[in-house]
Image: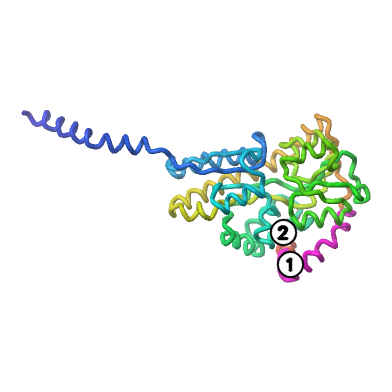
Amino acid sequence: MNIDRRRLIVAAGASAIAAPFVSRAQAQSPQILRLSHTDTPVGSRQQAAELFAKKVAEYTGNAFNVQVFHSGQVANDPKAIEQLQLGGLDFTVSATGSYAPHVRGLNLTAMPFLVDTYEQGWKLYDESKALKFQLDQLPAKGLRALSTWEAGFRSFTTKEPLGSPADAKGKRMRVFPNDMIRWIMEAIGFVPVVLPVTEVYLAIQQGTVIGQENPTDTIYSLRFYEVAPHITLTRHVYSPLPMTISEITWKRLDSKTQEAVTKAAADAAKHSRQLVRADEDKQLAEMTAKGAKVAKPAIAPFREAVRPVYDKARETFGIGIVDGMLADCEAIRRSNPA
């Protein structure tokens, strides 16, 4: 047998030995991770979630596949957080105040008028030591913050015009279950009514409440302007969306996968921030074209109305923790003027 023929036989034998191993590796199914949120299929959260899923697959070499469930298909915000704690879900994305029942100090992020611009808000969530202290307590509660996605500034949609706090007196306003938001609504003059976001459209339609307050992106994606056409841009609370992973899931991942998931979450956060800020004016214009009436009221009366909220926060959470957060925000506003 000549040398070339012998080499060919040896190479073929090696391929035959290697082939079953390669085939088994390629046939191995990726591990499934589940992400739940309450935004619609056209909302910014869904778009960022889809990017996150794509990046997780990319950074883990397709070892993990993130399945995204939108519109509260699996759970509303409080239930999704509960499922993360139990390990029934792997990820969720919700307003910071939604996590406050588990880490009470996170209520402070919903204090009124902390920042005036997106850039100031990003500085707050990326650099504030006071806020980091609160977020660092989440793992002990079964959750871990990976990044902060964007939602924007909370404003009102109501059935009737809302020109000043006088127009709010005694009227029922939907809120999500958060003490600070409830205090703000009461200070303005509303009667707060706690409802899951998935029930709000029907509640306004049926007259259970006269409106709700949420960022523009949420107002647009959930079409609240259809049943409460008066959009009043008070921008009373900056309301971004921490993305969290179940601590059970996190501890199950090896260090390389943890790094990959964290990197994917950061990519999704950057995309979310750019998307929401860029789309805000476009969304308002589209809602106006569909019959919404957008108003920018004088903000001073609203700022004055909510002043007691800061004192209530100090009484509830302590002067030091509240003033620490307010000091961080003041420094951020000075260094990044609107």
Q: CA distance from mark 2 to mark 1?
A: 9 Å
Image point (86%, 51%), residue name: 191
The boundaries of the magenta stretch are 300-325
> Looking at the rendering, which quadrant does residue 286 occupy?
top right
* Amino acid residing under circle 2: Asn
**Quadrant the N terminus occupies:** top left
* Amino acid residing under circle 1: Phe
Residue 113 lies within the magenta run: no
SS for tag 1?
Answer: helix
Residue toward you, 251 or 202: 202
Image location of residue 121, percent across then percent down: 70, 53
Q: Is residue 228 left or right of residue 153?
A: right
Q: Which mark is residue 274?
A: none
Q: Is residue 31 left or right of residue 112?
A: left
> Looking at the rendering, which quadrant does residue 328 occupy?
bottom right
Residue that carries the numbered disc 1 in the rendered image: 317
Residue that carries the numbered disc 2 in the rendered image: 107
Image location of residue 293, percent across then percent down: 85, 36
**Contact check, label 2 and label 1, Cβ < 8 Å:** yes
| Residue farthest right in this picture | 166
Q: Crowding near pointer 1: few (<14 within 10 Å), some, many (20+)?
A: some
